[in-house]
Amino acid sequence: MKEDSLAVFEDYKIRRIYDEESETWYFSVVDIIQVLIQQPDYQAARNYWKVLKNRLNKEGSELVTKCNRLKLEAADGKQYFTDVADPETLLRLIQSVPSPKAEPIKLWLAKVGYERMQDMADRSLDRRREYWRKQGRSEEWIQQQMMGRESRNKAGWISPEYSQCRTIHLDPAFVAAKRCLAYLDNVPEAEAYRVLRTQVMQRTRGSGSNTILITSALPGEGKTLAAINLAFTFAREFQHTVLLVDGDLRKQSIHKYLGCAGEKGLIDYLLEGSPVSELITWPGIEKMTLISGGRPFQESAEMLGSPRMKELIIDMKRRFPERYVIFDAPPILTGADVLTLAPLVDQVIVVVQAGKTSMDDVKKALQFLPREKILGFVLNRKN
């Protein structure tokens, strides 16, 4: 069953159709093109798309083949077959059109993709049914969805309830603007982090290694963004969950990337004795939790090497065997924090910024890490 509706971006009407079977919105490609080239004339936008489509076909791009043709209502009230695409395909297609509207429309589409993920994230059956009823879903449709999710659970899908921690809801436009896009399906950033996740899983499988520290030689190399996006991809893995921990006591930043309040963090557990349950936040993303926030603390190396920190990491490691714990740590060459924290975790990933980090800095940084724990490098911001 498919349902038509209109969406509005600024002054442009964008036709879309919802496929209940795949739980996916499909948008008119020509309507998106109208926004990008700021062309009120539909026929002109249609001709632009025709030329672009031919060019992409000649280049061997798979984007055109990922577009579908579905009937949408035109200005004359009649239904015509129209090229449509899902948000993930459109995010890649937009890159082919130079436009000042590219980033705003990408954020708008990312919000749609995030809302779909939110729909999948709420594991409470009663709340889920109520949410679908408010959307106007039929009882038959709701029952089919519940049966499908039950089958997925029987196949081994692991998805715990987060009833003991604080729940927040992220602003998808804000998160996308910060380049945290790995919750989407087919954007290039998501695919790159899926490859990274697979490599991490292959290299840690069977060893019991599930605590991973992500760092860099110097500040500004993208380690926090890498940690967030890697956590997003682990949350989508079939048999694993993920806890993302902000391990930089001097400068907590994960919650700032995600646009949520950082009321409490590691320092509140280490210094004030706050229960761990008060630190953990569920950001509305299925199978993912995070710890980030609290006041800055300058004597961070001493606190990270304290008995309480060692006990906490041991507990995080052993409490849920299927869970990966990802620590976003400070840069190696800015202090003693990583030297203190690295021996407590199973593996270390070093983020290196292309065109910025010198080989001398990388070699210098590696001297401070236990060689046997270096899982590998992530080359960030490569064109």
Image: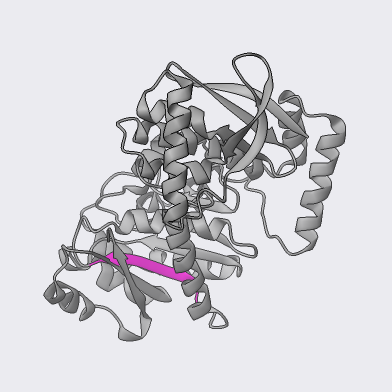
Which one is nearer the viewer's eye here, 338 or 141?
A: 141
Secondary structure mostly seen in magenta is strand
Tell me, yes or no, if residue 3 can be seen here. Answer: yes
Q: Magenta stretch containing residue 210, yes or no?
A: yes
Indicate the position of residue 125 as horizontal and vertical percent values.
Answer: 76, 40
* Region rendered in magenta: 209-216
Q: Which quadrant holds the C terminus? A: bottom left
Tell me, yes or no, if residue 263 can be seen here. Answer: no
Residue beneath the point at 33% across and 55% down: 224
The quarter of the displayed image where residue 376 is located: bottom left
Which one is nearer the viewer's eye here, 113 or 27?
A: 27
The quarter of the displayed image where residue 196 is located: bottom left
Residue reaching furthest right?
140
In this rendering, the answer to whether 43 lies above or below 348 is above
Indicate the position of residue 210 as horizontal and vertical percent values.
Answer: 50, 71
In this rendering, position of residue 1 left or right of residue 276: right
Which one is nearer the viewer's eye here, 354 or 349?
A: 354
Residue beneath the point at 79% across and 43% down: 145
Indicate the position of residue 110 as horizontal and vertical percent values.
Answer: 47, 38
How did the renderer colour the structure? one colour
Q: Magenta stretch containing residue 26, yes or no?
A: no
Q: Which quadrant holds the N terminus? A: top right
Indicate the position of residue 92 as horizontal and vertical percent values.
Answer: 44, 47
In this rendering, position of residue 360 left or right of residue 339: left
Which one is nearer the viewer's eye here, 13 or 140?
A: 13
